[in-house]
Amino acid sequence: MPGEAAPRGPAPDYKLIAPRPLCGALGAEIAGIDLSQPLSDALFAEIEAAFHEHIVLVFPGQHWTPAQQVAFTARFGPVEEHPLRSRPGLPEQPEVLVLVNKPGTRGARNDIWHSDISFWETPPLGSVLYGIEVPEGYGDTMFCNMAAAYEALSPALRAVLRPLRALHSAAGLAARNNAGDNNASPIAQVPDPVSHPVVRTHPGSGKLALYVNPWFTERFEGMTVDESRPLLDFLAAQATRPENVYRHRWRRGDVVMWDNRAAMHYAIRDYDENQVRIMHRTTALGDRPV
């Protein structure tokens, strides 16, 4: 029935890994894999299949260098810096974004539902986040399944959405960063908005997924902001229903990767400047949404 969470499909035939589902909507933990070591083609193929199936993967107890994190991420796609340089990268490895919260350095805000860099012509395929130092019990990250959100809509609404396109813009990000209260790099020039389909086809799984988000999606193409807002708000509310969300509680050494083509995420900011939180993030470039 519309509004219910879509059930997961049949699992691939895994032989080298044993993904453990983390909730009904999305997410799986894969234990016993050392990501700092080179992965065989067979092992990587199973990890990629699990990524397409579960959308969010958690690898606990990892210890790797920035170069090893880049090498792992590059198996999925080219690893690049943030296109607007809104977060600092490591001097020796600029593709590795450094997310820091510590005394004297307040972590930048990211507590809004979004899909990373959807304002770009070719948004990221996925992101890999490594928890180097975390205040356990604080700073959880939430993820929602955008394929299940689309499937749970009524057939009539799905038919309305299929041909629509929406404009995505970095204007809000620039305004927030340039206000000087987010401990993030200022953005000198905002690129023009880009148009993406409201419903995209996942190239790995073939599933249809909503591709709009409250942070970067300004309006539907051919409509005004005021005309667009009620439906965009409705879709966001449907996607982030509790039964469609996995909430990850970070532990030191966790590596969490998520599929930007089928998920939104929200970084909870319930910690203060006295709680040390250091994360490294890498991003794999994706294709133009279709």
Image: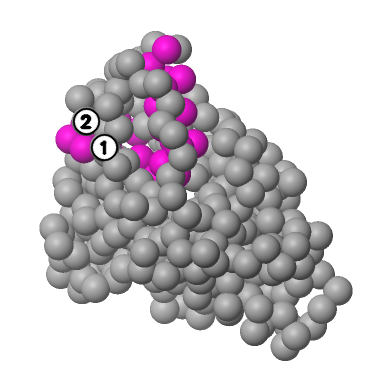
Seen from the viewer's position, the closer of residues 186 and 148 is 148
Q: Secondary structure at mark 2?
A: loop
Instruction: Write the residue at 47% across / 54% down.
Output: 6
* 175 sits to left or right of 183: right
Q: Are marks 1 and 2 in contact (CB under 8 Å)?
A: yes
Residue 14 horizontal/vertical position (percent): 36, 21
Crowdedness of circle 1 by 10 Å Cα count: few (<14), some, many (20+)? some
The reply to whether the magenta stretch includes residue 64 is yes
Residue 89 horizontal/vertical position (percent): 43, 47
Instruction: Write the residue at 68% across / 50% down.
Output: 200
Residue 276 horizontal/vertical position (percent): 18, 60
Seen from the viewer's position, the closer of residues 92 and 15 is 15
Q: Earlier in the sequence, mark 1 or mark 2?
A: 1
Q: Quadrant of residue 183?
A: bottom left
Instruction: Write the residue at 86% across / 74% down.
Output: 222
Q: Quadrant of residue 96?
A: top left
Which circle marks residue 31 in the picture? 2
Which circle marks residue 32 in the picture? none
Magenta region: 42-67
Tell me the CA gap for discs 1 and 2.
Answer: 9 Å
Amino acid type at circle 2 is Ala
Amino acid type at circle 1 is Arg
